[in-house]
Image (cartoon, grey):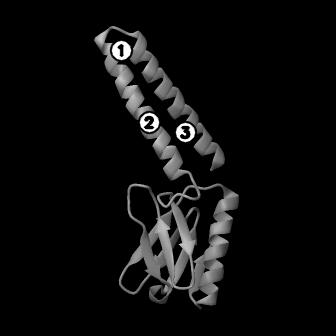
């Protein structure tokens, strides 16, 4: 995750600097408009890198487990979802996804992570599920 954040920041900073350069040096309207677009996308990219890839950001995608509930946030654009452990019937684990089955619905949490992070996520979910006597399938 750290390298992804660094790459996003680097490309966003380059985009911002190129946009500023086009705005300052170019007299042609096309290059001026392109400079403004690059400046805007660069600033948005910097904000996205900080919000989406920071472990401390409340907007970053995450799965948080505590005694009462499971909190899942998949993207920075959607609000997080809270699932009470008491409502979960069983949990199915597959490659980079976890499905929480409730009596009236199902919620599938799909994520992109390397193998080590995926194993840590699944181990944490499995451990909490076993404490709550919830059946875990696959994994």
Residue extending furthest right?
116
Residue 7: percent from left, percent from top: 59, 38
Residue labelled with disc 3: 8
Q: Secondary structure at mark 3?
A: helix
Disc 2 crowd rating (10 Å Cα; few below 14, some 14-19, many 20+) is some
| Residue 27 figure quarter | top left
Disc 1 residue crowd, few under 14, some 14–19, many 20+, Cα 10 Å: some
Q: Quickly name the residue at label 1.
A: 31
Q: Is the C terminus in the top left, top right, bottom left or bottom right quadrant?
A: bottom right
Is 22 placed left or right of 137 in the picture? left
- Separation of residues labelled 2 and 3 (CA atoms): 11 Å
* Viewer-side label of 2, 3: 2
Q: Nearer the viewer, mark 1 or mark 2?
A: 2
Location of residue 33 in the rendering, given as x and y in whole percent from the top left corner: 31, 20
Residue sitting at x 59%, y 63% = 95
Q: Residue at x 45, y 33 (%)?
A: 42
Disc 2 marks which residue?
43
Residue lying at 52% horizontally and 45% vertically, measured from the top left: 49
Residue 47 at what x, y percent from top left? 47, 44
Q: What SS does tag 2 mark?
A: helix
Q: Is residue 124 left or right of residue 57?
A: right
At mark 1, the secondary structure is helix
Task: Say which label, 2 or 3, has the lower sequence index.
Answer: 3
Distance from disc 1 to disc 2, alpha carbons, whole Å, reads: 18 Å
């Amino acid at each position: 995750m750290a390298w992804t954040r660094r790459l996003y920041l680097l490309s966003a900073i380059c985009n911002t600097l190129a946009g500023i350069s086009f705005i300052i040096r170019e007299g042609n309207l096309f290059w001026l408009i392109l400079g403004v677009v690059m400046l805007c996308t660069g600033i948005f990219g910097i904000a996205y890198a900080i919000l989406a890839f920071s472990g401390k950001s409340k907007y970053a995608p995450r799965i948080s487990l505590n005694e009462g509930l499971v909190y899942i946030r998949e993207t920075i654009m959607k609000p997080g979802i809270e699932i009470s452990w008491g409502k979960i019937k069983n949990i199915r684990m597959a490659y980079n996804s976890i499905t929480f089955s409730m009596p009236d619905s199902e919620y599938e949490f799909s994520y992109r992570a390397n193998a080590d992070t995926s194993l840590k996520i699944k181990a944490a979910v499995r451990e909490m599920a076993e404490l709550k006597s919830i059946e875990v399938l696959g994994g």
